[in-house]
Image: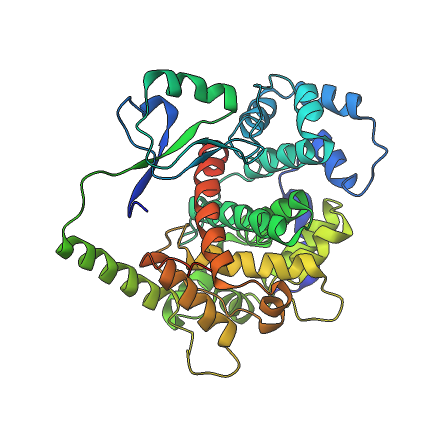
Amino acid sequence: MLNYDDIVNNLEDLPSLPAVVMELLNSIDQEDVDISVLAKKVSHDQALTAKTLRLANSSLYGLQVKVTTIQQAITFLGFQTTRNLITAAAVTGCFAEKQCKGFDHKAFWRHSIASAACARVLARQMRFNQDYAFTAGLLHDIGRLVLVACFPKDYEKAVAYRDEHDCYMIEAERAVLGIDHVDAGMALAGHWNFSDTMKLAIAHHHTPEAQGAGFLSAIIHVADAIAHALDLAQMPNGLVPPVSTVAWTALGLDEEVYLQLFRETELQYEEIALVLLS
Amino acid sequence: MTASYQHMPLAQVEPGMVLSDELLDVQGHVLLPQGTILTQAMIALMPRHGIAMLPIAVLAEPTEEEVAASQERHLERLDHLFRKNDPDSDQDWATALLRRFVTDYRLGALPVEE
């Protein structure tokens, strides 16, 4: 059995994000960042720049012109949105595919992207910050990658336990490892200096009814369930997690709105996945 | 309302194809109404509006058996995905509601017009 310290002690071995992305993550709550300096730093990373610009030019943002530099993207989309696109492009490329039998990296990212797309659509409906929702949706399960990267053999056993008992992955993690992907996600969030908003959403995406969990947790919780229900990750043993009545009630949406959101989520998912999984 | 549609990249769209939905620009203005038969000129203008994908109607109507079979597959898959949900449980009603909505969505139930 592992404990929280075992994760923290292993974090140093994890891939690190490009320095400029760390800077962006740390500054997510700040408004007074020197944008031109950051734009210049990102531009030095060509792969990152290319992915970011492809996202910016996707129909999600409906730009009338094609942006060709990070600085242009900031001008047309704003700093917040561009920063989130850079983060998304960086994080999805940063974990190497570790040998871990039964863990499907592609399916992991398909589900994360589906959750991000759905969270963004839900946030717009709720008039909540869409960029926060997108990033939190993308990162809510990042702890799984930490566990796979640090303890691949143990995680294989957890996957086998899940298959044997047909339980939720989080239950298998607790039974086999003694810790779960929420713990691991929190450890990484601390290590990578995520903002408090992001930390709360990662911490409470399974417990949005907890005191002080925050509205973003409710959005991510419901987006996670919808992403599973729409089956966008196409996992053979897919399983919809129980939906918190508190979170569902907090969103307070009716069927007509949900049917619209489902369709928009599917359309946005296709397009984002095309960029981020290439 | 066209029952089935395909989300198609602009490069694959050809003149003569039919829009399955109305096409909106960024501001939400209608560019083209639903059912428009696309021309070369219309397709050429899409990039200017930042549009890269188009909802294209699938013209060949599936047979009744095909529809039934596909609905059956959807229901089976949803049964599997929601296998932990007890629709009669008082505690788990939010999951049951999500299941109902996704089922309606998959079976093509349209929201009731006000």
User: Image check: A33 left or right of A232?
Assistant: right
Residue depicted at 76% across the width and 25% down the height: A38
Q: In the picture provided, is B14 more to the left or to the right than A157?
A: left
Residue A17 placement (x, y as % from top left): 66, 35
Report how many numbered discs are placed on residues in the image: 0
- Residue B113, position in %: x, y? 43, 58
Q: From this viewpoint, is residue A6 visible?
A: no
Residue extending farthest right: A32
Q: Residue at x 64, y 32 (%)?
A: A86
In the image, residue A143 sits, relative to residue A239, either above or below, namely above
| Image color mode | rainbow
Q: Nearer the viewer, residue B69 or B59?
A: B59
| Residue most extreme to the front | B114
Compared to A229, does A175 lie above or below? below
In this orientation, which residue lies closer to the viewer: A92 or A119?
A: A119
Looking at this view, is A22 or B106 the one in front? Answer: B106
- Residue at 60% across / 52% down in the picture? A125
**Residue A181 x %, y %:** 59, 59
The x, y position of residue A52, in whole percent, is 59, 28
Q: Nearer the viewer, residue A254 or B94?
A: A254
| Picture layout, residue B92 above or below residue A136 | below
Q: Is residue A197 visible?
A: yes
- Horizontal side, residue B105 vs residue A244: left or right: left
